Amino acid sequence: MTKSSSLSRREFLRMAGLGTGALVLAACGKALPAKATTPLPATALPLPDGSDVMIDLTAAPGTANLLPGQATRVWQYQGQLSQGAASSLQTIPDSYLGPILRLQHGQNLKLRFSNQVPDASIVHWHGLSVPDAMDGHPRFAIPQGQTYDYAYRILNRAGTYWYHPHPHGRTGPQAYYGLAGLLIVSDNDEAALGLPSGEFDLPLVIQDRSFDSQNQLVYVADTMNGFFGDQVVVNGQAQHTWKVQARPYRLRLLNGSNARIYKLAWDDDAPFTVIATDGGLLAKPVQRTYITLAPGERVELWADFSTYQPGQEVLLKSLPFSVSTGMMGGMMGSSSGLTNGAALDVLKIQVEPAAGGPFPGLPERLSAPGFYAEQDAVNRRNPRQVTLAMQMVGTLNGRTFVMDEVASDEKVRLGNLEIWEFYNSEGGGMGMMGGGHPHPMHIHNVQFQVLERQIDRQNRQEYEAISAGFVDDGWKDTVLVWPGERVQVLVRFENFAGLYLYHCHNLEHEDGGMMRNYRVES
Ligand code: C2O
Ligand code: CU
Ligand code: CU
């Protein structure tokens, strides 16, 4: 379902304060660029007059019919397309999620964010490389009633990215009440593969929520553990049955939960065929018997339901696993819901007969991901260390977030390739002071490669029950760091100089201050 009307376009123009004569637009069905554009150097990012896609995105209170009976009060992003192909904006009916923005590599996006919720907010484009003023840093948060204008070019390769609020201290509750959406980028290399598309290319945004007896969302969270709900909501809909045809699908999974890690598996033990991670397609498909997906992470699956008979059902579930949060974590307890590692049903799938055919086959090779070489890292002998700890709130190298602060060890040079080592110092017998919390670490403005992981002896047993579900084979912007684990990533700071963030994507850890700036200097 897409929305595009001349009324909305007029409204946008009025709000944008533009005379109608200023823009002569071929409003809808504008041809997409024939050839994907190569990224421009950081110095110049001209937006041609009349950008390719123009969207008006409003965050506002609303309602959604999530459960039978009373409607649920939510906060929602609503989109209006005023320029570009109608397919650029796709709403999900009866969902609290924002519209799916479907953009092409090389396109220019102009987006006016209008904040109509009674709280300061700003939008961040998770996984995209954009100039720092476009990145949704909390210093740009605007109060209710104001607008923020975004204009940037899509430099990322094809992939499943997403957007969500980023005001300091308020990201967790705002995302929880419904402010989140997918941003899907496509490019010519991907299109040439002929992967399942249209209704066979399905997003699966996984979030946990708790409802009260009046069907209203309940948010109770502490900074040490974060929010845990008692049921899973998929695509902003608490409706767990999907009808699919007995044919191949492309499934794009996002863990959009605040704090919950999922250990995903089919109930008939069929393996997953993974074709992409956070930053797009892998070089070739890989198999997993289960997938460990932490908050902020994405994977894409090739799911061939033709292996099922029409009428069969298959359940996607989250398998139980254990996380010893240590003595403090245990004593403090967590929120109302089931804690991390609880067994949960995610989605029931009913297989129906396929229409048409023949169907696309799984390509043997997917992409040339263009990985970096470790020996080119400027600090290969001396990786940059980021130590994660929990002292009532999470810390990064002993520090918490300060709006404009950048420490001397948080500066990087534009163009440099570096190794960053995240070390989760929790666990390892420090139970008295903190216990061990897993931390999904995210760096803004980049995609990185996971170079190496090392787990200490104390945490090995719990780790081995989830680590076979990591997909480190492709580009990542978020990586789970288990208690007692060291994870090295290889990252290049390219495209833009400026002030960006790195943080834990457990949203309550982030809101508690487990976030820091880093500065890219030219
Ligand atoms: Cu989804 Cu600062 O991130
Ligand atoms: Cu991000
Ligand atoms: Cu954390």
Image (cartoon, rainbow, N blue to C red):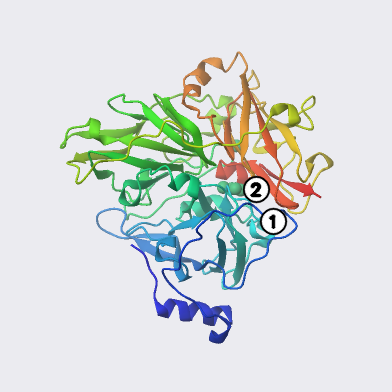
Image quarter of residue 165: bottom right
Asked if residue 522 is positioned above or below residue 350 in the image, the reply reads below
Packing grade of label 1 (10 A; few <14, some 14-19, many >=20) is: some
Tell me: residue 292, above or below residue 234: above
Q: Residues within 10 Å of mark 2 (few under 14, many from 20)?
A: many
Viewport quadrant of the N terminus: bottom left
The residue that label 2 is drawn on is 445
Q: Residue furthest right?
A: 408
Task: Mark 1 or mark 2: name the one nearer the start of the chain.
Answer: 1
Q: Amino acid at mark 2?
A: Asn
Q: Which residue is mark 1?
A: 132
Q: Position of residue 54 (x, y in %)?
A: 52, 69
Does label 1 point to a residue whose CB lies under 8 Å from ligand 2?
no
> What amino acid is labelled 1 in the image?
Asp
Q: Is residue 322 left or right of residue 361?
A: right
> Secondary structure beneath disc 1?
helix
Q: Give the residue at x 27% y 40%.
A: 359
Q: Element type at marker 2? A: loop
| Residue 59 x/y as whole percent | 50, 65
x then y, percent, for residue 521 = 80, 49
Q: Closest to the observer: 199 or 320?
A: 199
Q: Is residue 257 visible?
A: yes
In this rendered view, identify the residue nearer to me: 474 or 254.
474
Query: Would you identify the image quadrant in which residue 435 lies?
Result: top right
